[in-house]
Image (spheres, helix red, strand yellow):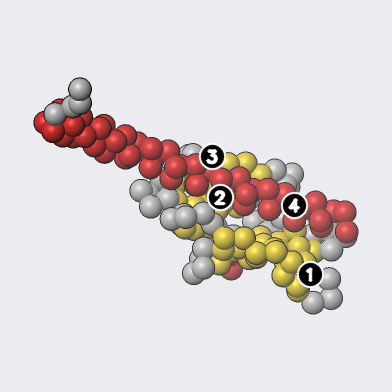
Amino acid sequence: MGFTLIELLVTLAILSLVSLLSVNPFSRVLEYNNLNTSAILLAKSIRMCQNISMEEGVRTRILLDFVDNSYHLIKVEKLPRVFSTYYLGNDIVFSWTNFSKNIIEFDPVGCPDMRDVGTPDKGGTIAIKSKSNRYLYIIVTPVTGNVRISERPP
């Protein structure tokens, strides 16, 4: 025996409805995962530049490119040289930063150089957002060089 056409259509309609209802929450999870992954990668890149400055005794910079939604890791030995470029995840954009000229700079001691901001004891923040306006903040403390990620602005 087989199934009637009506039984197959009802089953197909139920499956379509269930899959339609589950796609939206699943896409939100994927979007948050992309946002979180981008924030973690940026925080690790900041720490890497800090370590390179301390180990090699050279100045390093991170240039935030708000147009391309990318950032460039730069070594400043005699001349600045880009040694790596990273792009933010799908539908993730830079929202704002309080780093002057969109540059985070580490001196050979490994601490962010905040002279352009004018307040050496003030930290810096980079905000990234998803297409549904969910934000994550990458917060850099200049004195200790600590980097953390927060869902709340500092």
Q: Nearer the viewer, mark 3 or mark 2?
A: 2
Residue farthest toward the top in the current orientation of the protein: 1
| Residue 29 visible at all | yes
In this rendering, is residue 83 above or below 50? below
Within 10 Å of disc 4 (Cα), the crowding (few <14, some 14-19, many 20+) is some
Q: Residue at the spot x=88%, y=59% of the render?
A: 56
- Callouts 1 and 3 close, C-beta under 8 Å: no
Q: CA distance from mark 3 to mark 2?
A: 13 Å
In this rendering, is residue 34 above or below 26? below
In this rendering, is residue 23 above or below 60? above
Q: 129 and 29: which one is in front?
A: 29
Q: Nearer the viewer, mark 2 or mark 4?
A: 2
Amino acid bearing label 1: Val
**Residue to which mark 2 is pinned:** 38
Q: Quadrant of residue 109?
A: bottom right
Query: In the image, which disc is placed on residue 66?
Result: none
Q: Nearer the viewer, mark 2 or mark 1?
A: 2
| Residue 141 visible at all | no
SS under mark 3: strand
Q: Earlier in the sequence, mark 1 or mark 3?
A: 1
SS under mark 4: helix
- Callouts 2 and 1 close, C-beta under 8 Å: no
Q: Residue at the spot x=51%, y=54% of the render?
A: 89
Q: Earlier in the sequence, mark 1 or mark 4?
A: 4
Within 10 Å of disc 3 (Cα), the crowding (few <14, some 14-19, many 20+) is few
